[in-house]
Image: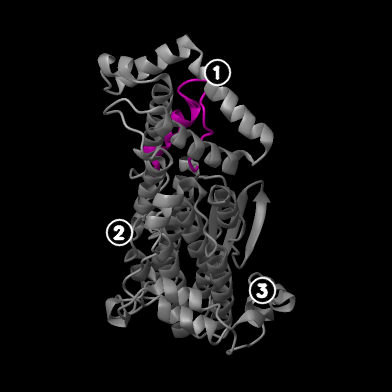
Amino acid sequence: MWRTLPVCALMLVFTSIGWGDEKPVEPNTIVVRFKIKPKAAPKPALKYQLLPELREMNPGNPIHEYTRCFAEQTNFWTTKQQIEKREQWQSMPLKDLPLDRKFGRGPLDRADYAARMDAPNWQMLLKLKSDGVATLLPDIQQLRNLGGALKVRFRFEVAEGRFENALVTAKTMFALSRHLSEHPTLICDLVGVAIATLAIGPLEEMIQQPGSPNLYWALTDLPHPFIDIRKGLQGERLWTETEFAGLTDAEPMSDRELQKIVQRLLKDFQFQSGSTKDSQRNFKDEVKKRLANEDHLRAARNRLAAYGLTEGKAKEFPPLQIILLDEKMQLEALRDEKAKAMALPYWQAEPILRAAHQSKKPHPDWLLPDSFVSYDKVKLAQTRLDQRFALLRCVEALRLYAAEHDGKLPSKLEDIDLPLPVDPATGKPFAYKVEDETAHLECARLIIQVRYEVTIIK
């Protein structure tokens, strides 16, 4: 039931961040303490990258290769001992990690290969068109497990100072997360955000290790926003067409045609509300009630007129066709009130999304439940990930500044002679101050407050 997955995906985004030296200081606030050495930019400036380059790529569809990471690897993926070890290794201090250069050899090597293929295709379009809201996504949980295992390998490589290898893993994780954004559902966009977030923790740990390269320009070179949600939004538009397939406002429809649509909607209503006899009876009773309610039919015709249906046509249509057309058009209107803001920066999108959420349903007796993913949560998750990349870019800018100024921190961010990112949540510079030779770098609160405390060591 893919409409139940957003909660799981958001929980992964908000709970599995896994920073190295972190301490909650107040509810929903995380402080990450960095002790870093000055480091100049590499030469050439883009010597290090965080996504696979074209020269690394091979032709082919990576999605099939990701699924092959699990073939004939039952012991690695499913035994209780292996699962428990991976969970421990994702969060234990770097100094306590075992030295295991063979960890995941085979399945994770295949993930590296998959991440460097150039034509991601989930082959989900026909499935979405046929199954609509009832589309199942059985493979997505596996890819979350793959992201967790890659994080473990990433941390092993950082702990040993094998930074070249660590960057290979970083590229694989970030490529996997972006490949998930090629899936035509917002749920997979959320899982993509979650897997990219898993990679942020080891990246923060790596920056603090002696000899770690400066990644300012590598971070600057990343796409923005990092997860593109356009295909997911298009998938949301597609499912309403699937649920109401056959419904037309061009001409009157027969009762047989309309009942066929009602039966499909009943099936989807059961899918979302629970397949109990009570839910079936409630749905059928609600349809009958509306058919007998002249006030409701009159209001529905008026709403359809506002959407462009002429009064003459509305009078010709049978009442059931009016009810179904009204339901479809209101679902589409609510969807677009949310979707229209999703391409905007967060500080512009948030008021629009909040207003759409507060308006609730356009009329109090909506036939179907609101089946849309919470668009505001998706935008929030997308923006929080972009905040993390922007914060890290500022940290690396501090390392660059310190390398040029005898290990000193700038008194204000404007002193850094580099193009610095703004907070993606506000469009304004990050909050910054220096106290007792420690820089405090803070982003706007989006559910969780993230604050970096950066100390330069020589």
Residue 124 at x, y percent in the picture? 41, 59
Q: Amino acid at mark 1?
A: Lys
Residue 51 at x, y percent in the picture? 37, 72
Question: Mark 3 — residue?
Answer: 93
* Residue 249 quadrant: top left
Q: Amino acid at mark 2?
A: Pro
Q: Estimate the spatial distance between the alpha carbons at disc 3 and disc 1, rounded to whole Å.
A: 62 Å
Residue 287 at x, y percent in the picture? 53, 24
Q: Amino acid at mark 3?
A: Pro
Question: Mark 2 — residue?
Answer: 419
Which residue is at a point 42% across and 67% down the rendered structure image?
396
Q: In terms of depth relative to the viewer, which is nearer, 15 or 416?
A: 15
Query: Which residue is the extreme one toward the top?
Result: 295
Q: In terms of depth relative to the viewer, which is nearer, 142 or 56?
A: 142
Determine if residue 331 is in view.
no
* Residue 435 quadrant: bottom right
| Number of other residues with Cα within 10 Å of mark 1, as a class: few under 14, some 14 to 19, many 20 or more | few
Label 1, secondary structure: give it: helix
Q: Is residue 310 left or right of residue 8?
A: left
Question: Mark 1 — residue?
Answer: 289
Q: Estimate the spatial distance between the alpha carbons at disc 2 and disc 3, rounded to whole Å.
A: 34 Å
Which residue is at a point 74% across and 78% down the rendered structure image?
81
Question: Does residue 338 lie above or below 4 as drawn?
Answer: above
Look at discs 3 and 1 and give the one toward the viewer. 1
Label 2, secondary structure: give it: loop
Determine if residue 80 is in view.
yes
Which residue is at a point 51% across and 75% down the rendered structure image?
206
Look at discs 2 and 3 and give the one toward the viewer. 3
User: What span is colored magenta in the figure?
Assistant: 346-373
